Image (tube, rainbow, N blue to C red):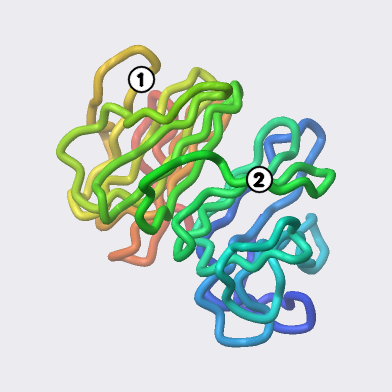
Amino acid sequence: VKLTGSQPYNGSTWIEANSLVVSNKAGSDTVYVAQGLAFTAAADGVGVWPIASYGTLVLGNAGGQGTGTGATPATDQFNAPASLAVDTSGDFYVADTANNRVCEVTPAGVQTVVPFTGLTNPVGVAVDIFSNVYVVCPAQNAVFEMPAGGSQTTVAFTGLHYPTAIAVDTAGDVFLSDTLNNRVLELPFGGSQTTVAGLNVALPAGLCVDTNGDIFVVNSATNSVVELPAGGSQIALT
């Protein structure tokens, strides 16, 4: 899917579209956009972008920034949501950055706050196939995990300098954009941290890994996107 320019969104335009994610739900080809720091009435929500159609608001409340006190997506307002993830059941996870929380919303519209504690401006969120939730807090140089049915832990990344984006592959390996260190890290399932070899990145921000193990990274310093195919060499996407 290629989105160019200012695409129509709920009668307005995308403003500061911070994160894109494709649904992991079987049979879905839907792209979702987290929109924060908006300057129009279409503010602080999460949009859904079905293939070949325009966006509609699916989470949050278009109309301004909120304190995150509502009980449902219809009554809640996010504040500068920066990232989102969708699990295999179609549940959303939203990094509600300025409200210092991660929200989960089921397809039926039941909204809860994932019970992380001590988050400071979370910006990256990911969920694996086992429904374990990961969140990145750049100001804390830390990544936290909320295992399904478990308690919060700190993911064993070290030496971080303003990490931003996170992704988890189908094997449970965790990938992290360590932005100000100009590198992408991998924490293999049950293993130790390594730097992903073969990636030449400059202030890496957005990050994803596909089912083939190919890694895609947004280089914010060069306004470019690069791909590292599994077992291959880096290529620039145009």
| Rendered position, 33 above or below 189 | below
Residue 155 position, x and y percent, is: 33, 29
Left or right: where does residue 29 sit relative to residue 185?
right
Closest to the observer, 204 or 69: 69
Q: State the CA–CA distance, disc 1 to disc 2.
A: 29 Å
Closest to the observer, 22 or 118: 118
Residue at 51% x, 22% y is 150
Secondary structure at badge 1 equals: loop
Secondary structure at badge 2 equals: strand
The disc at residue 188 is: 1
Q: Is any part of residue 51 visible from this angle?
A: yes
Give the class, few, some or many, for how many residues have Cα within 10 Å of label 2's Cα (few <14, many ≥20).
some
The disc at residue 177 is: none
Amino acid type, residue under disc 2 in the picture = Thr
Give the class, few, some or many, for how many residues have Cα within 10 Å of label 1's Cα (few <14, many ≥20).
some
Q: Quadrant of the N terminus?
A: bottom right
Residue at 59% x, 49% y is 103
Residue at 70% x, 31% y is 88
Left or right: where does residue 187 sit relative to residue 46?
left
First in sequence: mark 1 vs mark 2:
2
Residue at 28% x, 35% y is 185
Residue 130 position, x and y percent, is: 59, 21
| Rendered position, 171 above or below 100 | above
Residue 15 position, x and y percent, is: 57, 78
From this viewpoint, which residue is outermost toward the left? 159
Total count of labels: 2
Closest to the observer, 172 or 200: 172
From this viewpoint, which residue is outermost toward the top? 190
